[in-house]
Amino acid sequence: MVQSFEIAVFEGDGIGPEITAPTLRILEAMAKSQQDYQLAFTQAPAGAALYAETGESLPSASMETARRADAILLAALGLPSVRYKDGTEISPQLDLRIELDLFAGVRPVRVVPGQPTPLKLADGQTIDFVLIRESTEGLFHSKGKGEVTRDEARETLLITRKTSEKLFRFAFDYAQQRKQSGAGKGRVTCVDKANVFRAFAFFREIFDGVAKEYSHLTADHAYVDATALWMVEKPWLFDVMVTENMFGDILSDLGAGIMGGLGLAPSADIGHDHAVFQPCHGSAPDIAGKGVANPFAMILSAAMMLDWLGTKHKIETMVSDGARLRDAVYQVVADGRMLTRDLGGNSGTQAAADAVLEQITAKG
């Protein structure tokens, strides 16, 4: 029986449409060759350019499309030159996280042999860990609601037991899946600042409580500043890290730097019923329309989407296609012949995406 899935597509601003088009083309080609799933794409307008034109950054119709969809694929939303009246940037992706309760931000960090990285790795050494960031609370809780006077400003950090327990169970389940697949060690590290802030001591206490439910896995802790150091010095030691929203926001960019840049950094924001898949990079308006944007992070995010849908609906071919798509991107990167300029090459968006599709076709 063929199962059909509706994918809400937010192509958004800047380079968004340029990296979305080849990604959808690859997904269509992969689905066409399968007998048990189909993908239907529904465009959902949103973003800074739309706000500048209409006064709405996330229309109700687009929000409804997102709620109805089986998964959401998002390219890039926001432009530095377009801001809300309070001076903050247009960021409907944050609104999606809150409205759909996408509490778990999943940020994979992967380096394979041949991949450009600023780190000095031994021959054949790989890096493969996942940062899981709480995406609805933390310091981002007060977005747009901070108190500012002439002499001081205040933002409120929020950590709740309800959300933290969901987050930690997600992290342990994710680590368990990685261990079963052979990708991970079955280790979850709580990253916090519990030595200074009571809120993070509370966060750690909840983590330790949930960890008791997963006694077959390893649970430990690390302060966020030490974690940043170890991500540079010995990143191969990590498996799954789980942390607060702001810490995760910062560490995920450090992870992208380890991988050679944001052009290879995919992500997902996942809840119990909905999930958004998007590259970690922004809309890059300075290169929009030039055909030179790196599509790899967008394609890798689509691979995460296939894996999530396949796992959720128990469709092995979708899980397999997600792995095939991810491996095809890394094979192209390791090969080094079709790299975009941010990775040290001179290939354009279309040529880089074509190379991924050719790699998938070659592997059958």
Image (tube, grey):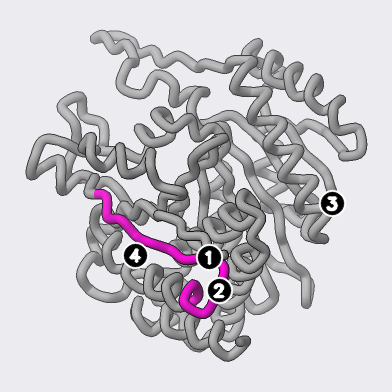
The residue under label 2 is: 35
For residue 248, what is the image quadrant? top right
The residue under label 4 is: 20
How far apart are the two marked residues, 1 and 3, measured between alpha carbons? 35 Å
Q: Are marks 2 and 3 in contact (CB under 8 Å)?
A: no
For residue 316, what is the image quadrant? bottom right
Q: Residue at x 66, y 49 (%)?
A: 130
Q: Where is 351 relative to 341, above or below?
A: below
Mark yes or no: residue 349 visible: yes
The residue under label 3 is: 185
Mark 2 or mark 3, earlier in chain:
2
Q: Is residue 40 rendered magenta in the image?
A: yes
Q: Which mark is residue 2?
A: 1
Q: Residue at x 52, y 16 (%)?
A: 158
Residue 327, how many percent across, how many down?
A: 62, 73
Mark 1 or mark 4, earlier in chain:
1
Range drawn in magenta: 30-44
How far apart are the two marked residues, 4 and 2, measured between alpha carbons? 24 Å
Q: Is residue 261 rendered magenta in the image?
A: no
Mark 4 or mark 2, earlier in chain:
4
**Hey, what amino acid is under mark 1?**
Val
**Hey, what amino acid is under mark 3?**
Lys
Q: Are marks 4 and 2 in contact (CB under 8 Å)?
A: no
Tell which of 218 and 173 is nearer to you.
173
Instruction: From the image, state whether disc 3 or disc 4 is nearer to you.
Output: 4
